[in-house]
Each structure stands twice: as structure tokens, then as C-alpha cells.
Image (cartoon, coloured by chain):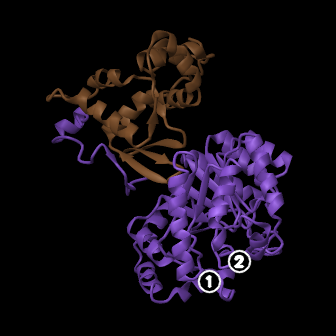
Chain colours: A brown, B purple
Amino acid sequence: MGYADLIRRAWRTGRFAASVRSSGKKGAAGVRPGESRGSIRGEMEEIVRRESADALGFLAPRGEGIMKLAPFVKFREEKFGAVLFETRSEKVFTLNPTAADVVRELLAGASEGEIGERLKGRYSDPSGRLADEAKALVRQLRDKGLIAD
Amino acid sequence: MASRKDAVKAGGRASRAPLEEALAPGMRAPLYIGWQLTNACDLACVHCIEESGPGRAFKDELTREQAFRILEQIKTEQVPYVAFSGGEPFLHPHFLELAAFLGDAGVSLKVETNGRHLTEAAASALRDHGVRAVQVSLDGATPEAYRKVRPSGDHARVLAGIRLLRSRGVEVEVNFVPTRHNVHEIGAAVDLAFSEGVSGFYTGRLILAGHAAKARDLAPTQEQYDAFFACLKAKAQEYKGRMTVRYHELGIAQEVRYRMANPAALFVILPDGRVKLLNALPFVCGDLREQSLTEVWKAFLAGWKSPRVADFVGRLEADPGLLQGLHRWIPL
């Protein structure tokens, strides 16, 4: 799978893991033997951030809006979840693991409505409130100027 | 929010709120590094708290190799934001090379400069290296007031530099330090910054440390400060949504006390690689020539809890003269 295809697949599906076939060989996709799902995911997220303008162009014809980090906001993974840092105001926002996952999904191109669905596979949701809570967090992020459409 | 399946098994939801505006104790590295590349400067400003000036470079400033070892760690630990200052960063022999490294690494870089070196080539290089912003010191709306605080400074040259940066799309911020000589020009200085396409105007109170501590009658009077902050409040409203006007009304003692209770994810690298808790405090928490960035970060977090720091900060309000010893560093 080529580089562009890998990006498009990641945006479309939200999955960053290379297939068994592609992860076992060196190639244009940049997938190397032994790379973990996490490292591939991190790399893909970085690509998505860097090339978000291209992402907008790709998604626009399908009528989907994507969100991205607001200008001057930086995201960093941490053991406890992640942090968002607004470099202008120097404000630090700490994310718990679940919130960090929501932001990762946003960065991966998930729309607000898709996030809950994507998280369901990873989280227990006995109250059925997962999607609503994810939307509430996205609103909070938007209100604080940390993400932009 | 719903918790991870394993967390549920272990007894419930994640304990922390999803999003908190706070520094987490477990953070692996700083989020912001202020790096004084050199103590040399080609101006000798009356209010400089770093006591920078011509010929004032430290004898043991970091070598190129040492600086790059720190940069590699900044990249590895994903420190998202660095500000190069000094002294005057343009006087550092490898300044643009260091800036290029950070640009390539995706680290946001701010450059704090006196504005004397913003040539066409420099402005283009800063743009090419993806510098997030250049903060230019412009403490006056007129050349007369400006020269009183920056005796050999050239107001017109600084403005020309700002225009070159803007012509290349580089974001420019202005820093203004109030003294008795220029405090009355604050409104005109904000207007001037806006007219030059500046995105942010930053100011606060004069810190009586370094050169400023030695100068007589430099600090604005209370009456002048009252008018200064009233003007800034009005200007912040006037330019809302068009230019950020940010000012700190707190005195340094209150500011430091606040920082002690709420440490920022920021530390300051001195030109020789030692690391300070804060610009306006004399405490040194590590040395990047001998320790890793993460080791110094841990020492930084511990340093803010040190009884010696608490004692110093407690005495600062009653005795602002303590800051006169800012450059007699105290290892923690």
C-alpha cells in the first residue's frame, strides 16, 4: 500500500495499523518489520497534523467536516493520557486517557458524530453515554479554542 | 467519561476529569523552554534584568555540540515550544542553525530579539525555518523615549525589521518594558504596534533586577502605573479580536508566589546550560551539560517545593532588593 493510500485509509477508517502483509515488508508505505501499532499510529497522527490541509481537500467532496487542533495548540502523549498546550497563552490542559483518545480520533479525521462509534470498540459503556460524553468533550475543546473546524 | 475496559475491571472510571486546565505531576518533560542562547547583546539597556550587553557573553557558554545535544533531547521528548532569547540571540554564532533544527523537528519557536538584526536575509531565514513568532522589544512610540531606555538603539531600524518580517508573513509580537522614560507612551506604542501588523503586545511591571536595580529612579511611580494599566485595559478592549494586548499587573513578588503555587511547564536554560526555575529567581535546578532533560525536569518540579525557594519568595514582598542578587545563582 502506498503512502497516499495509507493516509486515505487511515482517514476513512480511523485505523492506523498496517495489515499483516504490509507490516512485514519494507516499502513505499514506510512500514518496517517490527513496528508496533502504536508507533505506526503516532507516525500517522503526525502526518495527519502536518497535512491537514490536504485532508480537508480530500474529505470535502464527501461532505464531511473534520476538526483539527487550533493554531498554536500542541498535543503530546503522556503516561497519564495526554496534554494540550496553547503556546500563545501558555495554558496547559491535561487529558485523561479517554479524553486523549477522543483527541486522537479528532486528529485522525473523525467527525464529531463518528467518535463515539469508534470508541465503542475500546471502552465499556454500560450507561450508553459514551457518545454523548465524547460530544460534550468536543464542545468543551471547541469552547476553549483548542480545536477548530 | 466512559473508562477503558481494563479500568472498569479494576474498579471504575478514570478518576481525573477528562479535561483539566492544570499541570499534571506525571508529565515527562517541560512544554515550554526559554533558552537564553548567549548573554552578549549589542545594546546596553537600562532596564535589562539579565545584565546583558556588549562583551557580556559568559566565558563558558554552550558549544555547538552541547547545544545540539540539548536540541536532540527537546525533539525526542517532544517539547512543543521553545523561545530563544539572550542577550541577543542573533549574536549567537549558531543561532539560525539551531532555529532550523527546531523547525525541522516540528517544534514551535519564538525568537525574542532587540530587533537590530532583522535584515532581509534574516527575515527570510526565520520564515523558512517556520518560526512561530518573533518578539521584538519596542519600548517606545518615539525614537526619543526609545533611546532613553535603549541608549544606542535605533527605533527606525527596529520598525524596518518588523516590516521585513511582516512582508514575509512572519508573525511579530512586541514587548514593552515600562520605565519613567517611556511609560507615558504606552497608548501610542500599542497603536504603533497595531499599525505595523503586530499580533500581540506584551508588557507588565519593570523588574528591579540586573541593570534596572542599579539605575536611579527608573521605576514608574504608582500614579504612572495606574495610568499605564488603565490605558492598557482600554487598549485591550479597543483591539480585541485584532491584536492581543496582554499585561501583567502583578508585581514580581506576587507573580513568583503565584508561580510557586502553580508552576508553569516552563524552565529557563542559561547560556552555559544551567537551568533556572524562573527568570526572576536565582535558583538553579540542574545543568544540561551533565544531566538529561528529563532529569532536570524532575529536579525542576522538586525545586518548586524546596523550603529554600519558599523562604526566598516569602521574603521577597517585604524586601524586593533580594532580586539584586539575581545573578548570584543558588543551586538547589
Position of A5 compared to B92: left or right? left
Give the amino acid at mark 2. Answer: Glu
Q: Residue B29: where, in percent of width, then height?
A: 49, 54
Query: Badge 1: few (under 14), some or many (20 or more) residues near its Cα, within 10 Å?
Result: few
Q: Residue B51: where, in percent of width, then height?
A: 71, 77
Q: Chain of mark 1?
A: B
Q: CA distance from mark 1 to mark 2?
A: 12 Å
Which is more toward the observer, B237 or B149? Answer: B237
Query: Badge 2: few (under 14), some or many (20 or more) residues near its Cα, within 10 Å?
Result: many
Give the amino acid at mark 1. Answer: Arg
Q: Chain of mark 2?
A: B
SS for dot 2: loop
| Disc 1 target residue | B328
Counting residues from the N terminus, which is met first, the one under dot 1 or under dot 2? 2
Which is more toward the observer, A2 or A103? Answer: A103
Which is more toward the observer, B119 or B126? Answer: B119
SS for dot 1: loop
For the N terminus of chain B, the quadrant is: top left
Position of A89 compared to B73: left or right? left
**Marks 1,2: beta carbons within 8 A:** no
Q: As displayed, is residue B266 above or below residue A76?
A: below
Q: As displayed, is residue A85 above or below residue B281?
A: above
Tag 1 and tag 2 share a subunit:
yes
Q: Residue at x 24, y 43 (%)?
A: B14
Position of B43 compared to B82: left or right? right
Q: Quadrant of residue B293?
A: bottom right
Q: Residue at x 40, y 80 (%)?
A: B307
> Could you say which disc has been placed on residue B305 in the image?
none
The answer, for residue B108, to whether it is visible in the render is: yes
| Disc 2 target residue | B51
Q: Residue at x 44, y 36 (%)?
A: A147
